[in-house]
Each structure stands twice: as structure tokens, then as C-alpha cells.
Image: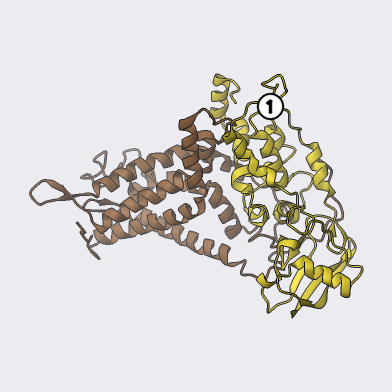
Chain colours: A yellow, B brown
Amino acid sequence: MKTTTFKVWQGNSDGGELKTYEIEVDQGYVVLDAIHRIQAEQANDLAVRWNCKAGKCGSCSAEVNGSPKLMCMTRVDELPADQPITVEPMRTFPIVKDLVTDVSWNYEVKASIKRFSPKTADHGDGSWDMDQYDVERPQEFRKCIECFLCQDVCHVLRDHQLHDRFAGPRHYVYVANMEMNPIDTGDRVAELREELGIGYCNITKCCTKVCPEGITITDNAIIPLKERVVDQSYDPLARLIKLVKGSGD
Amino acid sequence: MPSKVTALPVRRTFGDTMRIDAWWLQPVVVFVVFTSFVIYSTWAAFQGNNYYSGNLLSPFYSPLIWGDPAHSFTGTLEPGWWPSFLPVFSPAFVILWAPVSFRLTCYYYRGAYYKAYWPGPSSCSVGTSRKAYMGERHFPLILQNAHRYTLPFALLLLVFLSHDAWKALWFETGLGSEEVGLSVGTVVLTANVVLLGGYTFGCHSLRHLIGGGIDKLAGRPVQRAAYECVSWCNGRHMIWAWCSLIWVAFADIYVRLCAMGIWADWRIL
């Protein structure tokens, strides 16, 4: 057991401040454990959203020492011991109370995206033939737990607040999962360019760095989608080839 | 898309962050290395001499289309169409636009130099000073979408640089014939091809064009293998990008110093 200082942001949409707490930290503590201890012993009204405590539900997203992280997956002993540990809510979304933010905008954006539309089934029982290799490519995107840390760190949302023009990395992963699926027939490329605003992404790769599931968001989802947008909108040669060859795959 | 979200937290100002690590280090290193490279390569391109030493040709001047008549393809010092109002001609001028445009529009470099040169943001979760933001949707940054058009020239340069590395294997015997050998210069030019190859073959546009743009790669073994190879290089694109950038400058320095007689190309075999 050792005493560690935490600075936890407390407030609401009208404003707030960092409040200092000193607590005893057991071996193997994660930041969420510390927040629970503060809540139990010193600040009973501290609001925090959490659920699985295993890095799979994506509920306890916050900013620990300024970096977006899941509190349940951030060990206290891996943070600098000589300075207070700051815990703040995600800055990209409206604050409800303390560490809890309103992430409902993400669900609204997701609902606005063209749905998965499979081709006619290959067999009478409604099943399709798919090669394992082709299944595995978009499989990476299905690991997303919707913690929205990638949305939080993305400067287009965080600093420029273009929520009405830019869907954010989470939704590009969602689109990539459908676009690269061999049985999907939907075409979301024009939607990506216009409504979802993929052109605002300038490839800082911050989304990839903070993803707790290790999804290579920028290289495997966003850039391939940007290239598909180039095919359709900015590359006359690609359009000509597609016209000659037909729609292809 | 849903309407704008209201009641968002207050925007942070430039450099404002709660991060306590050395977040500024990476953009500073990128700024210093990239700026140093641009200054050196510009200087080297304007020299127009000391680019050839024995069997070694500087990669900044390859392919040597115009230049030293004994070594250039055309056998003339400069092209007849070179405008007379431009006081200087260097063989590098007709070459360097290709690698410069390829690197400038490269997806990796874009992310890196945006952070280092016009910080918006300088690093992840660090505040930015920029108010208006248009991303890559409008001129001039919309031109970044032409990256794939710079790719064929980068691939073509690899052919010429491979030829230079091959030529660096052959040494004059003094009896009017040549023999196979190995010098430090051979190693330098060969490593240059390997590093530039790793970088070029890991290009995101190439990855898309070779197989990433289609959803079914099963049943296409050659295309699938090519996609796998490009994806392997692509996964290390940043490493290839920096190693090849630094090495190509080093290769020019090596050949230049040999040509100037400051050091001699040491024959290993």
C-alpha cells in the first residue's frame, strides 16, 4: 500500500475543477479501482460510468494524465509516481457529470449510415460462401468495443468540433467493416466523402494509438476508405478503367 | 448526419494539454530531421557537380539524363529546352520532382509533417491554435489525393537505382576490362535500393491498387500474395520512410566526398 495523489475533474456542463484526493493504492490497482476508492471513501457523489472492468464494455473511457484511456486497463504503477495522476472526462463530448459524458451523438451518427445489405444468399438455407481469407480482413474491425477513445482523441472533433460534418474514426471502422465485406452490396463511398466527411481526416494516427483493442484504424480502415474515395472522385483513370471493366467486385 | 452537438467542453488553446510526457519530442525530431534533409538535398541538387565517382552515382542524380557527357544518357550537359533565363542547370532538377512529390503526398509523411510544420495538433490530445479547419477537402490539400499518380515515377526510379547498384559491383581492372567486386560504395548504393524499395512497396496507394480495393482476394493467389507482401512493408511504412530518407542523403554525401577526393571508396572484395 502506498499513498498516491489523484486530481479528479468534477463538475457539469456549466464548468468544474480538478479536486485533489490522496488515497492508499494497493498492488495491481488500476485507475478505476482508485476512482472507486475515492467514491467510497471521500467523494460519494463522484459520477463515473463503468461496467465490465475487463476492457471489453468500453464504458470507463476517460483521460488519464491527458491521454484517452480505459480506466480499467490503466495500471496505477505504470504511471509516473512522482506526480499526481489527473483523471478527466472525455473532452469531445458534452459533460453529464464529473467523469460521465454524453456519447449519444455517436449512436445517432451510426444509425444514419447506410446499413449492411447482403447479396442474395448462395444457398437455399440463406447462407453464403465466403473464403476465410476474405472474412478475416474486415474481422479486425469487429473488435471495436465502442469506447469512443478514438473519437475523443481525434482533433477534428476534439479541437475543431466538426460533429456535424465529420463522423470520426469509430464510424470509419464501422463503414470499413461493411465496405470490405465480400457479401455486402452497399456503396457508401459517396456518403464517406460528403456526409461522413472523411476528407477532414489528416492522418495524425492518434486514433490508432489510443485504441484499446489494437485496431489499426488509420492504416487498415481510414486510408483504404480514402483510397476508395479517390477511386470514385479524384482519379479519372480509375473511373475510366471501372467504366470499361464494369462495376467489378 | 446528426446536427451539431451542443454544450461541448471549452476548446483548449495551442499547446494546452494535461499530458505530462514529452509529447513535443516527436514533432521536434520530425521538424529537425525533415528540415535538415530539405536544406541538404536542395543544396546538393544545386551543386550540379561531384555526383559521380568511379562506378558510383549519387541517387539524387539518378537517372543521369543530362550531365557529364561521359556518363549521361543523352551525352549532353544540359537539355536544349532549358530556359535561358534560369541561370543554373543541375541534372538533379529533372529528377527530384518525382521522389519529392511521392514523399510529400505520402500518407505517413502527411501525418508527420502536419504535426511538425503547421501544428493542428502538434501531438495527440494537445490543443491547437487553428480556428478554421478544412482538412484535405479543399485546395491545396485536396491535391494530396494525387498520391497514386506519383507512384509509377517512384517505382521507375527504383529500376534506375537498382541499375546503379549493379554498376557499383563492377570495377575497372586497369587493363580496359571490368571485374566484379565489392566496396563500401556498393554496399551504400545497394542498401539505398533496399530501403527505398521497402518504403515504395509499402505505399498505401500501391496496397489499394494491388488488392486492397477489392473485397474478394480468395481465388486470386498471385494478387493475394502481392497484397500480403505490400501489406507487410506497409505495416513498417514509418520505419522504411525515415531510414530511406536518411540513407539516400547519406548515399549522396558518400559519393560526393569520394568525388571530391576527401575519402576513397574502400574496396572490400
Where is residue A3 shown, x and y percent of the image? 76, 80
The answer to whether residue A115 is visible is: yes
The answer to whether residue A193 is visible is: no
* Element under disc 1: loop
Q: Which residue corresponds to the image point at 62% horizontal and 32% vertical from the top-left? A: A233
Crowd around label 1: few <14 · some 14–19 · many ≥20 (10 Å): some
Q: Is residue B256 left or right of residue B54?
A: right
Q: Which residue corresponds to the image point at 74% horizontal and 79% vertical from the top-left? A: A1
Where is residue A91 shown, x and y percent of the image? 78, 59
| Image: A138 above or below A2 | above
Q: Which residue is mark 1?
A: A185
Query: Given the current orientation, which residue lies at the most extreme left position?
Result: B175
Q: Nearer the viewer, residue B45 or B87?
A: B45
Q: Is residue A196 left or right of residue B174?
A: right
Q: Amino acid at mark 1?
A: Thr
- Asked which quadrant contains residue A249, the reply is top right
Q: Nearer the viewer, residue A181 or B116?
A: A181
